[in-house]
Image: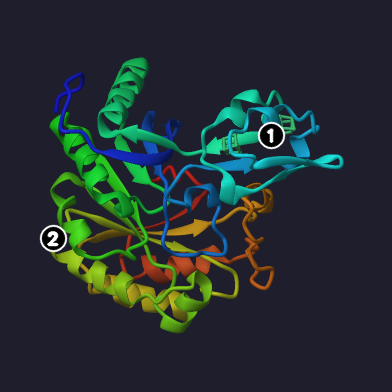
Amino acid sequence: MKMGEKMANSLGCILDIQSIQDKKENNYKIYIYFKGCNIKCYWCELPEAVNLKKEIQYITAKCDNCEKCIYVCPQNALLKNGNSVIFSRDLCVQCGNCVEACDRQARIMAGTNISADEIIEEISFMQKKMGKPPSSIVLTGGEPLLQDTFIKDILSACKENNLHTTVVTSGNVAFNKYIGIVPFTDVFYYSIKSLDKKKHKKITDFSNNKVLNNIKQLNEIANDIVLSIPLLKEVNDQKEEIEEIRDFVKGLKKISAVELQIFNTIPVEKYQALGLEKPTDSLDISMDIDFSQLVAVLEEANIKTRVTKGIARLSI
Ligand code: SF4
Ligand code: SF4
């Protein structure tokens, strides 16, 4: 589908679409953040992307209990209780009335239902505004592969318009979901949290069996894979762990680079606004990690390595 044309159109749910400039490269990328994730990383910076559907974020610190939202809710999901508003999430149908009624932005809708056509139109609009094509369209999340038909439509339209594409994935999906998008994906940005099965289960709640099997199969058919490792203090920042990663990467010829990711603090207030349990305190997310030693382990084996920080990782 060329920009401006309509295509057989699938629907999906995204959190956001943003163009982000890369000053170093004098270019920009367009990031599409998909809703839905099927692993549970305790350091997740984007908990509003975990649920596959739209949901309300209620920021109690911004609420002055004016009650405007209560009057517009068709579900009685909002009730006055003394000097506060009680929100019953199980009754909410995400109609958005309360978001419109709230002057203080205390209620925010996390997620938009959108068609693949609309996403391509938005990409076209951003491209016109910037005056040149982006260096990549980055599909991230969440786990984009949970909406595989939807992302296939977006990726194939991007390729028809000669746009570079990147898919960010945690690898915990059935392998056949990758097969359909490989022809339209320039780079898979593949995250492995740990090669150690017990550790992976402890820090994500899921086994890494599928993650490791999928990357081996993807290595046979993908154009390019960048391996991303979230580095967590005293979890996977030991030299021996990175040596294992080095040996693993050496066996997979499509991996062109390894990225070691630094995280910020866990956004506890976002978890509260979504009515989610606060992530565990028992694991440290401190950034006090000696990266130089870890980078050296990989570079000495001629593995292209970089260190990145922040949700929109600009080196993608
Ligand atoms: S409209 Fe906004 S500020 Fe007023 S009670 Fe509702 S959430 Fe609070
Ligand atoms: S989104 Fe609609 S149903 Fe949900 S709390 Fe707001 S007004 Fe009520």
Q: Comparing marks 2 and 1, which lies closer to the viewer? A: 1
> Looking at the image, in which quadrant does ligand 2 appear?
top right
Q: Which residue is mark 2?
A: 221
- Image coordinates of residue 34 in percent, x first then y, are 39, 45
| Relative depth, front residue between 112 and 223 | 112
Query: Separation of disc 2 and disc 1 at Cα?
Result: 46 Å
At label 2, the amino acid type is Ile
Residue at disc 1, CB closer than 8 Å to ligand 1: yes
Q: Is 61 or 171 nearer to us in this picture?
A: 61
In the visual, does 174 lie left or right of 109? Answer: left
Is 261 placed left or right of 187 in the picture? right
* Label at residue 106: 1
Looking at the image, which is closer to me, 184 or 206? 206
For the residue pair 258 and 35, the one nearer the viewer reads as: 35
Amino acid under disc 1? Ala
Mark 2, other Cα within 10 Å: few <14 / some 14–19 / many ≥20: few
Of pointers 2 and 1, the one earlier in the residue sequence: 1
Estimate the x, y position of residue 265 in percent, counting from the top left. 65, 54
The x, y position of residue 20, in whole percent, is 44, 32
Q: Secondary structure at mark 1?
A: loop
Please tell me whether residue 125 is drawn above or below residue 234 in the rendered image. Answer: above
For this orientation, the residue located farthest to the right is: 82
Quarter assignment of residue 217: bottom left
**In the rendered image, the vertical position of residue 129 relative to residue 16, given as above or below:** above
